[in-house]
Image (cartoon, rainbow, N blue to C red):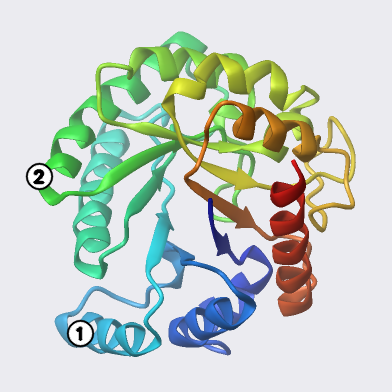
Amino acid sequence: MKISCLPVSLFGDICSNKMTLSDWAKTAKEIGCDGFDISIMFLKNRTPTYLAELKRQLAEVGLPIVMMTTYPDFTHPNAEQRERELLYLQGDVALCSELGAKYLRILAGQAHPEPSAQECVNWSADAFHEIDLCAKRFGVKLLFENHGKPGAWDRVDFTYDPKNFLEICNRIRDTDIRVNFDTGNVTAFGGDPMDVLPQIFDLVETIHVTDMKEKGVFSPTLIGTGVTPNQKVFKYLKDNGFENWLCIEEASNRGLDGIRDAYRYVKELWDNA
């Protein structure tokens, strides 16, 4: 088992240049992480000079980018916008490849009020089949997540409802796309992650370890202080031979202290599961 971290608590600092990506990589290494995660929001541009310098800085740190997260919106009611979203995502695949990131986390889209659930499932599944071909060419592994509510969007994710997530998972079993299962988002929706995880465990590649302060409310809190049953999740994973990445999504708004505390808790919880 290996641990990485997506530092949601540091998004503001990184996006505003108060903290550089190389600073984040150094911090993750110092904390003890085996790799680190980034958001597409952290990258300033895609110019050759910027990317070359960024790669040089990260190579000096010597810690791999495990996962890059991005925010495609394939449930948008406008067909032209959905086509744009696919082109944007193709660019993210290329960027992920250039930076040497192992995984690219993808989403279905927002819970727009206009389309039917079946339309959203169909549009997402079709787009995933198309982007799967692109990712194979670039050697990037795509991970689909049961997502909640990112700052990049106005609405919650269409797959916030587990039944939508499970339906899309079943539609993409013929692709190479696998799952980044988020433990806290099911709790936030009002469910139990242990009712969902066994249904798609064969697809699970990585785990987003999160915690919610209250069941039925999107209320991220310091991992280990909320109501998400991460201990049960970890035991299930261990009992079923899971040995891949645990990717901490630290969103307690406690900065580096929160990330350090979350890392220590997750490592101990896994060791004792």
- Tag 2: amino acid: Arg
Secondary structure at badge 2 equals helix
12 in relation to 201, above or below = below
Of residues 101 and 153, which is closer to you in this image? 101
Q: Residue furthest left?
A: 137
When asked about the image quadrant of residue 151, the answer is bottom right
Residue visible at 90% across and 39% down in the picture = 214
Judging by the rendered image, the residue that carries numbered circle 2 is: 137
177 in relation to 206, above or below = above
- Tag 1: amino acid: Ala
Report whether residue 172 is seen: yes
**161 sits to left or right of 255:** left
Of residues 72 and 138, which is closer to you in this image? 138
For the residues labelled 2 and 1, the Cα–Cα distance comes to: 22 Å
When asked about the image quadrant of residue 123, the answer is top left
Badge 1 crowding class, 10 Å Cα cut-off, few under 14, some 14 to 19, many 20 or more, is: few
Badge 2 crowding class, 10 Å Cα cut-off, few under 14, some 14 to 19, many 20 or more, is: few
Q: Position of residue 157 (x, y in %)?
A: 57, 34
Report whether residue 112 is seen: no
Q: Position of residue 206 (x, y in %)?
A: 49, 42
**170 sits to left or right of 183:** left
Secondary structure at badge 1 equals helix
Query: In which quadrant of the rendered image does the C terminus lie?
Result: top right
Q: Position of residue 170 (x, y in %)?
A: 41, 12
Q: Position of residue 243 (x, y in %)?
A: 50, 42
Judging by the rendered image, the residue that carries numbered circle 1 is: 52
Residue visible at 80% across and 72% down in the picture = 254
Residue visible at 55% across and 48% down in the picture = 153
Of residues 132 and 42, which is closer to you in this image? 132
